[in-house]
Image (cartoon, rainbow, N blue to C red):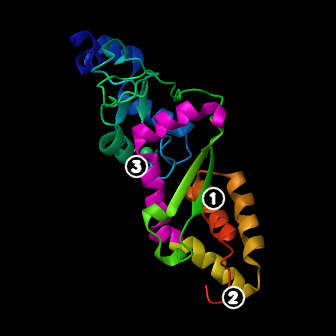
Amino acid sequence: MGLYSQQLLDLKALRDKIGQIDDHYRQFMAINHRGKCPFCGITDMLGVYHSKREAYDHYLPKGIYPFNSINFRNLVPACHYCNSSYKLAQDPAYSSKDPAGATHRRKSFYPYTTAGHNIEISIDLSNPDIDNLTASDVQLTFGPTAISEELDAWQDVYGIEERYQAKCCSNDAKDWLEQIRIFRDEHGIDPEAAIATIRQQANKDLIANSNFLKAAFLEGCNRLGIWGSDL
Ligand SMILES: [Zn+2]
């Protein structure tokens, strides 16, 4: 088993060949400079200007797939929450046990694909009191259905639904609403027009400032038809 472990990565001959993992991380983050975790899209990542780095996750857990433990296409930088709070040793390729104790093979996203995943997210809110939302008021819908199996695996492994719900109940979401109120009250800009602008901005960069969630959240608010002057 030592063949597939950190011991091997520490061997000088191999290190000279493949480089130090810190070097790999710096190079990786210089290319992948979006600044957010590629798995949740909402957590800032330590990058080229930080002296520390995020941990690498074995996407396919090394305890189950030891032959893949030093496959660099299986090593993925992930934020602390994705790696250490949610995913842990879960296997993206198999569901957790069902009531009968069986696991089921499932499709999951390949992190190193260059094709992109084009995930669609819409948010519906069941409570018009949008300043006092709770997680159960926030319904998330993910698409497209052609990749529903991969989407389910991703949500399952990384706790995506509850994390996005929490974000929509957070101070960030209150700040998103405040921006719409300032547009309306200070500048006379109709909320629908303001939200259309925010969607345009999100389409330029979905990841920056959690724009993909911000736009979906505000569109959900808009569908509630709540933009009275008292809001
Ligand atoms: Zn993350």
Residue range in magenta is: 145-173
Q: Is ligand 1 less than 8 Å from the beta carbon at label 2?
A: no
Q: Which of marks 2 and 3 is in front?
A: 2
Decide whether the magenta segment is chiefly helix, strand or loop. Answer: helix
**Cβ at disc 1 under 8 Å from ligand 1:** no
Which mark, residue 4? none
Going from N to C along the chain, the mark reached first, 2 or 3, is: 3
Q: Tell me the quadrant of the picture where the N terminus can be found.
A: top left
Q: Do the residues labelled 2 and 3 touch (CB within 8 Å)?
A: no
Whole-percent x, y for residue 67 in the image:
34, 11
**Of the pair 155 and 2, the residue shown nearer to us:** 155
Which label sits in the foreground, 1 or 3?
A: 1
Amino acid type at circle 1 is Ala
The answer to if 160 sits in the magenta stretch is yes
Q: Residue 50 carries which label?
A: 3
The residue type indicated by label 2 comes to Asp
Query: Secondary structure beneath disc 3?
Result: loop
Of pointers 2 and 1, the one earlier in the residue sequence: 2
Residue named by callout 1:
216
Badge 3 crowding class, 10 Å Cα cut-off, few under 14, some 14 to 19, many 20 or more, is few
CB under 8 Å between callouts 1 and 3? no
Residue 171 falls within the magenta-colored stretch: yes
Residue drawn at x 77%, y 79% as measured from the top left:
190
| Image quarter of the C terminus | bottom right
- Could you tell me if the residues under marks 2 and 1 are in contact, i.e. CB atoms within 8 Å? no
Q: Name the residue under label 2.
A: 185
Amino acid type shown at disc 3: His
**Label 1: element kind:** helix
122 lies above or below 55: below
State which image quarter holds ligand 1. top left
